[in-house]
Amino acid sequence: QQPVQSPQAVILREGEDAVINCSSSKALYSVHWYRQKHGEAPVFLMILLKGGEQKGHEKISASFNEKKQQSSLYLTASQLSYSGTYFCGTEIRNTGFQKLVFGTGTRLLVSP
Amino acid sequence: GAVVSQHPSRVICKSGTSVKIECRSLDFQATTMFWYRQFPKQSLMLMATSNEGSKATYEQGVEKDKFLINHASLTLSTLTVTSAHPEDSSFYICSAIRGPGGYTFGSGTRLTVV
């Protein structure tokens, strides 16, 4: 049930780009993306509600392919502050309940 | 924006004792709250869904008698780790829903059982 993210870890030099993928075995209602620094709570980046939707936030954007049950997060011209662990969250809904399930995570390190 | 306050941020307890963690929605009413647990270098795993005025719904493999959840009001949910043991040491974090797709997280509680 937990979405699988790839890659598990990536190391970048400042200014380089990266793509993080999130794949679910279940139908997705929405996809959320978070970044977590060590020892802190996850910080919300963006949510994609519709299949095929793309969203952007500064140099961070994401796409959502509802049919393939996949989402990708794009980091362009990475900055040192982008370092952390990125999680996708897939929202599962059914009659009377909804919940957010986090993916396996991708650790990103941006070096000078 | 929506704020969820979680206390304590850190707690150290002796093995065999119980620890209570509070999660409060400060500027909105939360009929549903969620409790997650995160071990080092792992993902956040959903433990249970807390519903105001009713019993919590636990995820498979989570012991409901060990992790007691109470959601007595629209702004407060508590998680009590009973008879804590070192393997319960983890980062516990709560979340509440505000609006469509709006999951707001508390700041987390680092529990260390010695």
Image: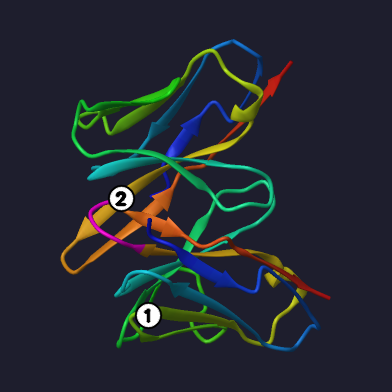
How many callouts does the rendering have?
2
Q: Quadrant of residue A109?
A: top right
| Residue extent of the magenta highlight | B97-101
Tell me: B44 left or right of B77. right
Residue topped by disc 1: B56
Residue at the image position 34 percent from the left and 46 percent from the top: A90
Circle 2 marks a residue in which chain? A
Residue topped by disc 2: A91
Residue at the image position 37 percent from the left and 69 percent from the top: B27
**Is B16 in the magenta?**
no
Is A8 above or below relative to B110?
above
Tell me the quarter of the image containing the C terminus of chain A: top right
How far apart in space, not on screen, are marks 1 and 2 (Cα)? 18 Å
The dot on residue A68 is none
Tell me: B14 left or right of A90. right
Q: Position of residue B96 (x, y in %)?
A: 38, 65
Q: Quadrant of residue B66?
A: bottom right
**Is B99 in the magenta?**
yes
